[in-house]
Amino acid sequence: MLLGEESKFIWLGALFLFFGIVAILLGQAEESSYENALSRRFDLREFVERSPKWPQPHSLRIGGLISIAVGVVLVAIALFNYYT
């Protein structure tokens, strides 16, 4: 069983991994719902040209990737410290 600082890093890393995956999934869901809403309109100019940039889904994906990277680093540091 992990005791001490290593367990804190592993739990923190797991938390970052969880929130990163949730952020990526939310970003994909929002992007698809936004595109579905635009494709139902009669004026498809926004859908075809993607003229009004809606950065929120991409921001969620990027934040999720950063969170996953931080989580992997924290778990790796904890495991390295535990096994050395």
Image: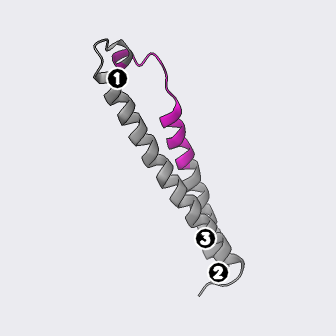
Which numbered mark, 2 or 3, is in the foreground of this view? 3
Q: Is residue 52 left or right of residue 79?
A: left
Q: Is residue 35 left or right of residue 80?
A: left
Give the vertical position of 52 relative to 77 (above or below): above
Which numbered mark, 2 or 1, is in the foreground of this view? 1
Give the vertical position of 60 relative to 14 (above or below): above
The label shown at residue 11 is 3
Which circle's residue, 2 or 1, is located before the other in the chain?
A: 1
Which circle's residue, 3 or 1, is located before the other in the chain?
A: 3
Specify start and end residues of the magenta stretch as a single range: 47-65
What crowding class fits label 1: few (fewer than 14 Cα within 10 Å), some (14-19), or many (20 or more)?
some
Residue positioned 60% across, 65% down in the render = 13
Magenta stretch containing residue 68, yes or no?
no
Please state the horizontal and vertical placement of residue 22, each as a whole percent of the image.
Answer: 48, 53
Counting the numbered discs, the total is: 3
Which numbered mark, 3 or 1, is in the foreground of this view? 1
